[in-house]
Structure formats: structure tokens, C-alpha cells
């Protein structure tokens, strides 16, 4: 049986992973540095990719053991490196993140209709990030900056219609994410949260269209989304480190209009 170290390394720049219910397919080894990750959702539920860097002393088996024992939180030693966030079936999300060489696992933490995180259903993939052998890709040119704080979002300027690259910087003391929700006419981000049902990818109040998965404090990343004119919401669903309440319950959600 070959190891991840023997698998071919994906080319630098763009790497693509396909999500199905409940597994990921894609390269086993990718080059490090600034990496653009495309998530294609070919399942029937919402899916995301959360990159987790494993410390040198931990393995995929260690991660599985701890997340199975307590799926409500990641192991304290797990290092969030973000990734493309939630998208509905048949759609895709793109994020650009910095990946240091080492062992990682990819997971989907979204719950199914029974409330079980997809990672417990097999949606976990080990990968190896190698030191880049060619000149690293530059940071993307962004249209605006979204700053995450404990507990809120701050935009450097309004979002305009069209394909936009948003630079996300986590200035908080905890890990944060941003889920971008395209809202239905007349709906608010609070309406979306109030009506959220696990296992239902598209709600009457709106649908997730990407964003950036969990990112440790002090780190940054980018996501790309094509914004049509209309109403949108930004949400952080990650749990508070102490109370375990989702960050949106502490105010980490935002309504905005793209026009």
C-alpha cells in the first residue's frame, strides 16, 4: 500500500476537490504556499472544506479518535487553515489560503439532517502539503477587506456587483469563519439563522454561496464570489471556546446589500 508521500504532487496554483455525500475526491499531495482551492459540490447536501494542519506529533488516527469522542469541538491541537466554505449542491466555491508543508486532514463539519457532522460520516481526507519546488504564487489582488473580530465583521468598503475577491483577516483571539448567504427577497440574516434546518441546503430565506472556513486568529485568506445585486448575509457558525454557543449568537452576523 503506497503512502501519501508516494502520491504525485498536484501542480502549483489551483487544486480542485469534489465533495459528495459523504466523501472528498482530489489530490493526495499538493504544493505549499499560497494555494487556490476549488470545491465542487456534487452531493445532495451543503458541503465545505476545512483544512486542518496536524502537529508533527499527531496523526490522522489521533484526529479521528478525538473528533469521534467529542464531535462538538476540534481537538485543542488542531490548527485551522481555512478553505472554501458552504455551497449548495451543484455549485462551487473558491478560496485562496496559505498552507505550510506538513500533514493535514480535510473535513466537512456541516451537520446532516440528524445533526451529525459530515466528518463522522466519512467526510475526511488526509493530504500531504509539500514544500513548493517552483516560485510561489503571489497573493491574489483583492477588491476589499473583511476583518473578523470577537465577535463581528468589518468591511473596508461596500461590495459591488460582479466577481469579487475578498481578503479576510482574523483579528480576533478565536478562530472565525465567514459563510456568505444569498438572501431571498425581504429576508434578513436573522431570518436565515432562525429557519436553518440541518440537511436542507436551500431554505426559503436563502442559501450559502461560499466564503472562508475556520481561520485561526492572526491569519488571513481570500475567497472569490460572483455577487449579483441583492441582499446578502455574513455568518460565523463556529462555537465559542468557553460557552460553546455559536459566534452568531454573540453578534457575529451581518446584513448587507450589493448594489
Image (cartoon, rainbow, N blue to C red):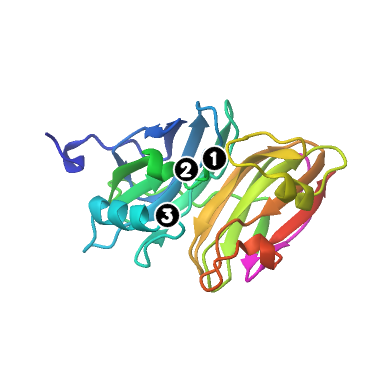
Instruction: Report x, y in % for residue 49.
Output: 46, 44
Question: Which residue matches tag 2?
Answer: 36
Instruction: Report x, y in % for residue 255.
Output: 79, 53
Q: 66 or 6: nearer the eye? A: 66
Question: Which residue matches tag 3?
Answer: 71
Q: CA distance from mark 3 to mark 1?
A: 26 Å
Specify few, some or many for label 1: CA neighbours under 10 Å numbering under 14, 14-19, or 20 or more.
many
Locate residue 78: give its quadrant.
bottom left
**Is disc 2 placed on a helix, strand or loop?**
strand
Disc 3 versus disc 1: nearer the observer: 3
From the viewer's perspective, tell me whether residue 37 is left or right of residue 128.
right
Q: CA distance from mark 2 to mark 1?
A: 7 Å
Q: 58 or 64: nearer the eye? A: 64
Name which of mark 2 and mark 1 comes first in the sequence.
2
The question of residue 154 being in magenta is answered with: yes
From the viewer's perspective, tell me whether residue 204 is left or right of residue 221.
right
Q: Can see residue 119?
A: yes
Question: Which residue matches tag 1?
Answer: 94
Locate residue 81: give its quadrant.
bottom left
The segment highlighted magenta reads 148-162
- Residue at 71% in and 58% down: 253
- Position above or below: 235 against 28: below
**Is disc 1 placed on a helix, strand or loop?**
strand
**Is disc 3 placed on a helix, strand or loop?**
loop
Specify few, some or many for label 2: CA neighbours under 10 Å numbering under 14, 14-19, or 20 or more.
many
Name which of mark 3 and mark 1 comes first in the sequence.
3
Q: Pick the quarter of the image with the N terminus.
A: top left
- Residue at 65% in and 69% down: 151
Q: Pick the quarter of the image with the C terminus.
A: top right
Instruction: Report x, y in % for residue 50.
Output: 45, 49
Q: CA distance from mark 2 to mark 3?
A: 28 Å
Amino acid at each position: 500500500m503506497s503512502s501519501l508521500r508516494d502520491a504525485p504532487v498536484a501542480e502549483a496554483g489551483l487544486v480542485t476537490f469534489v465533495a459528495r455525500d459523504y466523501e472528498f475526491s482530489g489530490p493526495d499531495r499538493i504544493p505549499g504556499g499560497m494555494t487556490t482551492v476549488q470545491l465542487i459540490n456534487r452531493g445532495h447536501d451543503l458541503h465545505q472544506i476545512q483544512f486542518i494542519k496536524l502537529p508533527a506529533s499527531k496523526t490522522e488516527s489521533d484526529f479521528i479518535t478525538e473528533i469521534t469522542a467529542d464531535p462538538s469541538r476540534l481537538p485543542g491541537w488542531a490548527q485551522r487553515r481555512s478553505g472554501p466554505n458552504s455551497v449548495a449542491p451543484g455549485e462551487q466555491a473558491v478560496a485562496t489560503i496559505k498552507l505550510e508543508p506538513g500533514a493535514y486532514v480535510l473535513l466537512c463539519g456541516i451537520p446532516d439532517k440528524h445533526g451529525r457532522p459530515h466528518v463522522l460520516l466519512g467526510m475526511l481526507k488526509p493530504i500531504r502539503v509539500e514544500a513548493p519546488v517552483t516560485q510561489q504564487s503571489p497573493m491574489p489582488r483583492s477588491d476589499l477587506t473583511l476583518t473578523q473580530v470577537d465577535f463581528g465583521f468589518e468591511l473596508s468598503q461596500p461590495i459591488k456587483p460582479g466577481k469579487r475577491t475578498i481578503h479576510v483577516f482574523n483579528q480576533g483571539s478565536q478562530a472565525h469563519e465567514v459563510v456568505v448567504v444569498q438572501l431571498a427577497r425581504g429576508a434578513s440574516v436573522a431570518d436565515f439563522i432562525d429557519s436553518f434546518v440541518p440537511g436542507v441546503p436551500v431554505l426559503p430565506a436563502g442559501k450559502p454561496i461560499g466564503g472562508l472556513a475556520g481561520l485561526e486568529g492572526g491569519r488571513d485568506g481570500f475567497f472569490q464570489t460572483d455577487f449579483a445585486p441583492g441582499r446578502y448575509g455574513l455568518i460565523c457558525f463556529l462555537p465559542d471556546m468557553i460557552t460553546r454557543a455559536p459566534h452568531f449568537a454573540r453578534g457575529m452576523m451581518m446584513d448587507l446589500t450589493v448594489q
